[in-house]
Amino acid sequence: MNLTLKIWRQKSAKDKGQMVAYKVTDISEHMSFLEMMDVLNEQLINTGDDPVAFDHDCREGICGMCSMYINGEAHGPDRGVTTCQLHMRMFKDGDTITIEPFRAKAFPVIKDLVVDRMSFERIQQAGGFISVNTSGNTQDANAIPISKQAADEAMDAATCIGCGACVATCKNSSAMLFVGAKVSQYALLPQGQVEATERVLNMVKQMDEEGFGNCTNTGACEIECPKGISLENIARMNREYLSASLKG
Ligand code: SF4
Ligand code: FES
């Protein structure tokens, strides 16, 4: 395939930035999207140009680093995949592909397609953990009975990889799908009960301080989420928040 790529280039956080067009040729439909980006970058390096900066690590849908907004969709046109799992067979010869960073006030651009998602880390630090007794008398987690339904729902919530596609997709830049997943992961399990009240209050407070918007029930986040995190997690977080507020 021969393609035209329109890519957001921005030298630094202070630079204004602009879309720049590039041509790539002989792209195999079996390549991943990031392999296609590697081809472009090799081309740019060979001609003495600055390669396009983009985040990636695992390249298998686990780390949540590859944050690209492709043809107006977070992680591109396929469903249930991250950008690194997106195949070039989703495009056709002669296509023009628009590639932008994830855009949100709480995700400032660092360079080109790389955004700063430390706001997510700060939300996690505010409550995304449990305390465990390490005195030597720690109860084995497997000795605590948990219903199959609660275990399955907690596991589903825990599959959130913190990629930020939900935020990039949301017209309000809301982080409620991400925070809902993180709150639910613990709220569903007995191990999460000790800090349950402070957790939801602190995580929501941090989310608001970071400048994320509110949820208005559009549901775009659930559709674009590569891990299929359900809106049910937002509802659970709201219930947890209400109950914690009444206790507090
Ligand atoms: S909820 Fe989905 S889209 Fe949002 S950060 Fe988690 S995995 Fe990514
Ligand atoms: S590079 Fe790790 S999820 Fe894409």
Image (cartoon, rainbow, N blue to C red):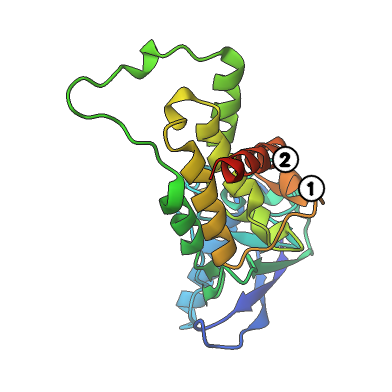
> x and y percent of residue 112 in the render?
55, 75
Which residue is found at the position 47% from the left and 45% from the top?
Answer: 198
- On screen, 32 above or below 122? above
Q: Is residue 147 above or below residue 78?
A: above
Q: Which residue is mark 1?
A: 219
Q: Residue at x 48, y 44 (%)?
A: 199
Residue 162's x, y, as percent? 53, 49
Relative to 103, 183 lies left or right: left
Q: 150 or 97, which is in the foreground?
A: 150
Q: Quadrant of residue 128?
A: top left
Label 2, label 1: how many angstroms apart (C-alpha)?
A: 7 Å
Disc nearer the start of the sequence (2/1): 1
| Residue 79, placed above or below residue 119 | above
Q: Which residue is mark 2?
A: 231
Residue lying at the far right in this picture: please name it: 218
Q: In front here: 48 or 106?
A: 106
Query: Which of the 4 quarters of the picture holds residue 76?
Result: bottom right
Question: Looking at the rendered structure, which numbered label has been put on residue 207?
Answer: none
Q: Residues within 10 Å of mark 2 (few under 14, many from 20)?
A: some
- Secondary structure under the numbered disc 1 in the rendered image: loop
| Residue drawn at 63 percent across, 41 percent down | 237
Q: Amino acid at mark 1?
A: Gly
> How many neighbours does mark 1 have within 10 angstroms: few (below 14), some (14-19), or many (20 or more)?
some
Residue 86, visible in the rendered structure: no
Q: Answer yes or no: do the residues labelled 2 and 1 have beta carbons within 8 Å?
A: yes
In percent of width and height, residue 163 lies at: 56, 52
Q: Amino acid at mark 2?
A: Leu
Which residue is more in the foreground, 5 or 200?
A: 200
- Asked if the residue at label 2 sits under 8 Å from ligand 1, the reply is no
